[in-house]
Image (spheres, rainbow, N blue to C red):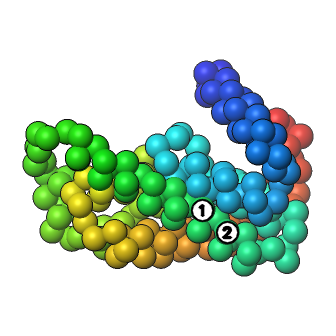
Amino acid sequence: MDGLFRRAFMLNAILTSLLASLALPAVGLSTLFVISLLSATLLPMGSEPAVFAVVKLTPALFWPAILVATVGNTIGGAISYWMGYGAKQVLAAERQTRWFGWLQRFGPKTLLLAWLPIVGDPLCSLAGWLKMDFWPCVLYMAIGKLLRYLTITSLLLTVPNGYWHQLLNWI
């Protein structure tokens, strides 16, 4: 558990440094966009806590926060797509695996699952690797990511404030 906290602290320090160098505030829609974009690449971080924090601090920003996070996360997914596409260009050897066959069979619709932890970001890269049609891939990424943010943020908002205060006191 100690290693997990150390890694989380290091990631927080890196993100804080990045936001400072970009002259972004600690909390706000522009910061939410950057966090959402970065978390959709292969970086090991999630953007849901940032979305929840913005919405909890400013409930009137519910829809703007959801939309900004969705756009940032979708653009991050598109970046992963192009990284996969570029890797395919560089690496001449093609190895067809069960994953590739599954992705090719279902096509861009598989990117509805781009929101899943661990496998979602690599799915975007594999879609690029397989040279799936870009715009349908982006559309399905956006739909999946929008539904994720709506679901998770709505569920977190149902948790009573007392729970969050106890959690902060414990930490």
Query: In x, y percent, where is residue 100?
Result: 17, 54
Front in this rendered view, residue 23 or 56: 23
Q: Is residue 69 visible?
A: yes
Disc 2 is placed on an element classified as helix
Q: Are marks 1 and 2 in contact (CB under 8 Å)?
A: yes
Which disc, if any, is residue 136? none
Residue that numbered label 1 is attached to? 72
The residue drawn where x is 75% and y is 54% is: 31
Residue under label 2: 68
Please identify the quarter of the rendering in which residue 4 is found: top right
Name the residue type under label 2: Val
Q: Residue at x 13, y 58 (%)?
A: 101
Identified at 23% across, 61% down, the residue is 131
Along the line of sight, the residue nearer the viewer: 146 or 126: 126
Q: Nearer the viewer, residue 156 or 81?
A: 81
Name the residue type under label 1: Gly
Q: Residues within 10 Å of mark 1 (few under 14, many from 20)?
A: many
Query: Judging from the image, what secondary structure is the residue with disc 1 in?
Result: helix
As measured in the structure, the alpha-carbon distance from the residue carrying label 1 to the one carrying label 2 is 6 Å
Determine whether 13 is above or below 131 in the image: above
In the rendering, at what x and y percent does residue 114 appear?
42, 61
